[in-house]
Image (cartoon, helix red, strand yellow):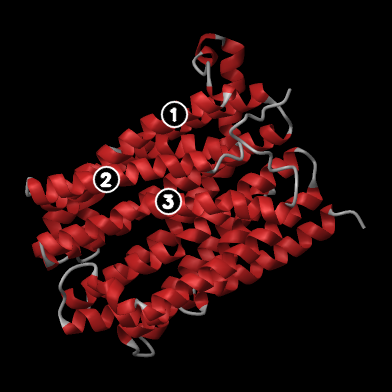
Amino acid sequence: MSVSTDHTPSLLEGSAPKRLAAFSAPLVAANLLQYAYQFVDMGVVGNVVGETGLVAVSNASTIVFIISSIAIGLMSGCTVAVGNRVGARDEQGQRRTFAASLGVALLGAAAITLAGTTLAHPIFSLMGVPGTSLAQTVAYLEVVSLGSVGLFLLNAACAFLRAQGDSVGPLAIMAFSAAANVILDFILIVGFGLGVVGAAIATVSAQGAGAVFALWLARRRHPSARDLFRFVRDAQERAEVLTSARYVLRVGVPMAVQQAVINLSYVFVTAWLNSYGPTIAAASGVGLKISTIAGLPCWGIGQAISASVSQSIGAEMSNRAVAFARSGLLVSIVVTAGIQIAVQFGAEWLVSLFGESGKDLTEAAVLYLRITCSVNGIFYASMYALDSFALASGAPKLALANSLIDAFVMRAGLAWLLSVPLGCGFIGIYAAQAAAPVLPAIIGFAYLRLWSKRNLPE
């Protein structure tokens, strides 16, 4: 049974490089919009509340970014599982897998709500958040945790759309959510004077509205997103959904852990940088935010690779799967290199967007960007593209292993070596972050070559 719709050109037809480029462009924009709200939160809070608010949001955003990454990683299981069924032209399988993914999303949100509200204060105390900012930091995370159901459902619906080859839908959803967040930021922070808490309320409200829009759009565009509740009524169908849920978790959990581990290493790094005083803490928070946003196109292209490769494997088209991987890798490197060059030229202006800062803070933030947004971007782009191929081709544990190398061997381990025994201080921590993706990228190249050798005809 054909599952394509008028809204969704097939990823399995035409030139693979052209389809990948056209498919990934809206996903890159959608990822930028999804995280734009954190950039806006910091900018508005920095200008209205000042340095204490900026430190609060920069530290809280480190944990919030982990939560967002877990949601994206977990729902990547939906993209791969549904994508396989799209490639096999199995509409009922798509419907069953999407129902399972929504259940997984709700469980994930419940776990985040419990963990975030319980551990917020201990986490930020251990991170050494300055006392003047601690209460605001805790409040921000508590609000975001309580509203995480919107984040998870939003990502589940967008993952389903991506699996269908629909990248315009997620872009429209993220544009809506980002616009709502910006408007609410000015209303709650500037208008009502709610400060850091207002920024958090704006975030969860925008995500909740985006989730409603995303679920409606998925149902409207794709028949396999309809009649999901019938699986609850029939015992045999419930069993099939549970089987699908296990597959979603088998792919999604390693990716969620991967994202959590990588970003947890940023928490350790942020904690070390807090020990160098509030100026370095705030500067590093600003630099990390800019460098993270600069790297977001890699995520969008990686999502495109996962969706297109999973469809190709579902349709038993190994040649096309490899073509998508290679095209995505090239696009990711070119796009990231261009962004890194732009960041280098506009570093001081980008830092100024976060409010009036002293000379020391500005110089430290610019130095952070000089080191972490440079040639290492080529390896960063390669790591995400190749890990996305590993995920879709049935090796999510490889992507997880790469994340452990990136986070603990390279970023955290090398940061400690450079900053403490070798006495390079916070500059050594910056350098370790730049070097982190090098070894994982090399491993990813080796896996792509091995998979191609095993699966492509002679």
Q: Position of residue 269 (x, y in %)?
A: 34, 70
Horizontally, is 440 left or right of 45 in the view?
right
Q: Which residue is mark 1?
A: 215
Task: Tell me if label 1 and label 2 are in contact, CB under 8 Å.
Answer: no
Nearer to us of marks 2 and 3 is 2
Q: CA distance from mark 3 to mark 1?
A: 20 Å
Quarter of the image with the N terminus in it: top right
Q: Position of residue 317 (x, y in %)?
A: 80, 45
Q: Which residue is mark 2?
A: 181
In the image, what residue occupies the spot 23% across and 80% down? 362
Quarter of the image with the C terminus in it: bottom right
In the image, what residue occupies the spot 8% across and 63% down? 132
Between 194 and 268, the one lying in front of the other is: 194
Between 77 and 314, the one lying in front of the other is: 314
- Asked if 13 appears above or below 403 in the picture, the reply is above
Q: Position of residue 5 (x, y in %)?
A: 63, 29
Mark 1 / mark 2, whichever is N-terminal? 2
Between 128 and 203, the one lying in front of the other is: 203
Mark 3 / mark 1, whichever is N-terminal? 3
Q: Amino acid at mark 2?
A: Asn
Nearer to us of marks 3 and 1 is 1
Mark 2 / mark 3, whichever is N-terminal? 3
Horizontally, is 46 left or right of 84 in the view?
left
Horizontally, is 49 left or right of 235 in the view?
left
Q: CA distance from mark 1 to mark 2?
A: 19 Å
Give me the disc on residue 30: none
Q: Amino acid at mark 1?
A: Leu
Q: Which residue is mark 3?
A: 69
Q: Secondary structure at mark 2?
A: helix
Residue extending furthest toward the right: 458
- Total marks in image: 3
